[in-house]
Amino acid sequence: MTLEQFETFALPHLHIGTRGPQLKLFLFKIFNYILKFLYLGCQQKELPIRHWSITRI
């Protein structure tokens, strides 16, 4: 999905939070990662993101 398509079709339906820390990734990138995950069925570690914030208990 291109940035123009995202801004036209997806962004109006997303809720942008007002509290909490600022996003380190653009909503456009996050949305495309979710689409890739749904389409390919890949695991989270296979997504092309450099730093995942994984908390261990």
Image (cartoon, rainbow, N blue to C red):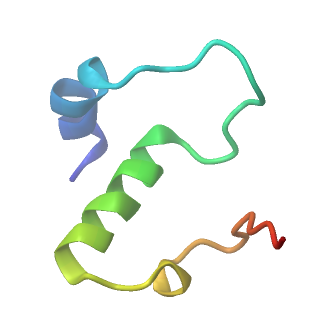
| 12 to the left or right of 33 | left
Position of residue 4 measured from the top left corner of the image (x, y, whole percent): 24, 35
Position of residue 18 measured from the top left corner of the image (x, y, whole percent): 63, 12
Taking the spot 41% from the left edge, 20% from the top edge, the residue there is: 15
Toward the viewer: 24 or 14?
A: 14
Q: Is residue 2 above or below residue 39?
A: above
Q: Quadrant of residue 19?
A: top right
Taking the spot 48% from the left edge, 87% from the top edge, the residue there is: 46
Which quarter of the rendering shows the C terminus?
bottom right
Taking the spot 23% from the left edge, 69% from the top edge, the residue there is: 38
| 30 to the left or right of 50 | left
Q: Residue furthest front?
A: 57
Toward the viewer: 31 or 42?
A: 42
> Total of numbered circles in the picture?
0
| 45 to the left or right of 53 | left
Taking the spot 70% from the left edge, 45% from the top edge, the residue there is: 24
Position of residue 13 measured from the top left corner of the image (x, y, whole percent): 25, 22
